[in-house]
Image (cartoon, rainbow, N blue to C red):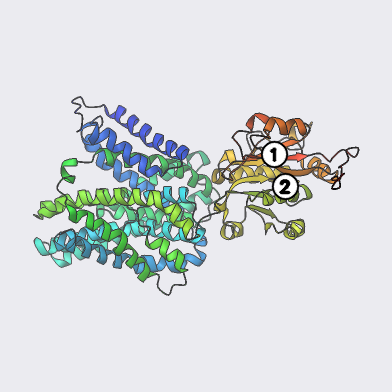
Amino acid sequence: MATEYTDAMSPVMAFALVGALGVGSQWLAWRLRMPAIVLMLLAGVLVGPVLGIFDPQRDIGTLMGPIIAIAVAIILFEGGLTLNFHSLQDAVKGVKRLVFVGAPLGWLTSALALHYVAGLSWESAAVFGGIMIVTGPTVIAPLLRTARLSRRPAALLQWEAIVNDPIGALAAVLAYEVVLVLNTSTTVGEAVIDLAIGITIATVLGVAAGYGLARSFKRGWVPEYMKVPVLFSLLLATFALADGVLHESGLLAVTIMGIVIANANLPSYEELRRFKEHATVLLVSGVFILLAAGLDFAALSRLDWAALAFVAIVIFVARPLTVLISLFASGIPWREQILVAFTGPRGVVLVAVAGLFGERLLDLGFEDAALIGPLAFVLVSATVVLHGFTLAPFARFLGLTGADTPGVVLIGGSKWSTAFAEALKKADVPVLMTDPNFGHLRDARTAGIDTFSGDILSEAAELRLELVSYATLVAATDNDAYNTLVATDLAPEFGRENVFQIMRVKSESARHQLPRTLGGRPFGPDKTHTELERMVADGWTFRVTRLTEEFTFDDWRRERPDALLVGRISEIGDITLIRKDEDVKGGPDVRVIALRPPRDPAEKIQPPAAAGS
């Protein structure tokens, strides 16, 4: 039973609580390796209807609707920013099928489930069925971040979620206009004109805003420090203008705006996208907390067994049927089709838009529309929890994730880096070596190590390499400036704590020294590329040693006082690059990787004694 709190929380305190719960849930999920969406949902329900500490309607009031609307617009715009047509390649046919065939088919199957299973009228089922086209970009992004899917199925899920999101909202608008025509004095002509004008204006506004912004940035009409403020202002203006003409068309406008900018080849595109990613993490957290805290248990109590049957039919029949028919004969491998078919999480857009149209249908006299909001929340909760816990293992079962053991990317082919890669490979750690010079990778190829001849920062590398299989990167070329560039550029993707580079050549002249704020973390021994090459040439070797209760790290260190630590491999196979003895943690079965000096020539290996001697 919920605890009643009669004193309303101030809006400032409410926003602080939402931010703390949202970001705290994401951090805790990262630490526990759990789906963040599930923890955010639980946190919102706990402080809201369970404990009664926070009630969005009471503590925030009328601001809640606009806040959620703007947050969803920014989330969709950021999603549009990730949709670069070059990244589609072999997934382009599948995405087209999921949009042009899957969206209307999903509308139909959802409406049928709502009418025949959940018991809604055809009017309510048609409107809500349109909204159910949406598969939740607010949910897909965190799930993909956790599940580490292969490139093509990840692209299919991401593009479908973002592109179909505004389509689902507009489908609900279309169905609602039809309901208006059939139940009020609104004529067919008026409804068609309103819809056509709204979609046209939203499209034109989105294209114009995206093209105008890209052009102004390229021409230098906006100074660097004002680019993000101008972007935000134009985004909000585009959303507001389009939404003022036709409700929910603002989502279409901002999505189109994001796609146009993503494909405009802006020099500052990465900086803009990363800033928007950070803002989106905060917004997704906040919106989920708000919606979960605003849950009405009394409304949920009106649902019966039919609601559970409806959710099961949507997840296990309607969604798979829609995807499998859409992707039939598309050339997409069957494993990827199965994964996409059984992955259809719904998010905040579904709940927000469903609540809005549920109220509108109630005003028209459709009493069953009161069930739309509760059904939407149950569907979102069920899919978030289900896919949050099952997507990664299901993808692993189908062989559509990165390697079970996160690997290492070595940038630069040389004698010492090849020796390091061979040691990792013998320890069953996936390793990839890259170098623009094909000849530098000859020894690695001979040793059976995976290689990529090309620049790791090139578009070809982005499209051809499944970097999701690798968790650590070491910039190890003989060019300190290039190592720093690679480490700095790829740090946001791998995480700064997982990006390393070999020691730079020290220069006495300040004009040749690179800032310490750039680049990656120091790699293993404090040695430059030249020093590491010389050490390997002199007989130093990379060796992996397993520690046990009988042979501890202290025992190893006594035997190898001159060995230089490079990394540790945990009991489950995860590798961590280290430099100090105190970084070796863990119990038995931990392995250490070290660069060991050549055996003393005076030390002889005694042959085994003959039998009977």
Mark 2 touches mark 1? (CB < 8 Å)? yes
Name the quadrant containing residue 106.
bottom left
Q: Which residue is mark 2?
A: 420
Q: Residue furthest top?
A: 7
State the quadrant of the C terminus.
top right
Q: Residue at x 44, y 61 (%)?
A: 156
* Mark 2 neighbour density, 10 Å: few (under 14) some (14–19) many (20 or more): many
Q: Evaluate whether residue 108 shows in this view.
A: yes
Res 258 label? none
Question: Which of 44 and 260 lies nearest the eye of the viewer?
Answer: 44
The amino acid on which the numbered mark 2 sits, given as a three-letter code, is Phe
In the rendering, at what x and y percent does residue 21 appear?
36, 34
Left or right of 190, for residue 459:
right
* Mark 1 neighbour density, 10 Å: few (under 14) some (14–19) many (20 or more): many
Question: Which of 364 and 91 lies nearest the eye of the viewer?
Answer: 91
Q: Residue at x 70, y 59 (%)?
A: 448
Q: Which residue is mark 1?
A: 566
Left or right of 145, for residue 267:
right
Separation of residues labelled 2 and 1 (CA atoms): 9 Å
Name the quadrant containing residue 99.
bottom left
Name the quadrant containing residue 184.
bottom left
Q: Residue furthest right?
A: 602
In the rendering, at what x and y percent does residue 259 appear?
43, 56
In the rendering, at what x and y percent does residue 33 appear?
46, 42
Left or right of 566, for residue 11:
left
The amino acid on which the numbered mark 1 sits, given as a three-letter code, is Val
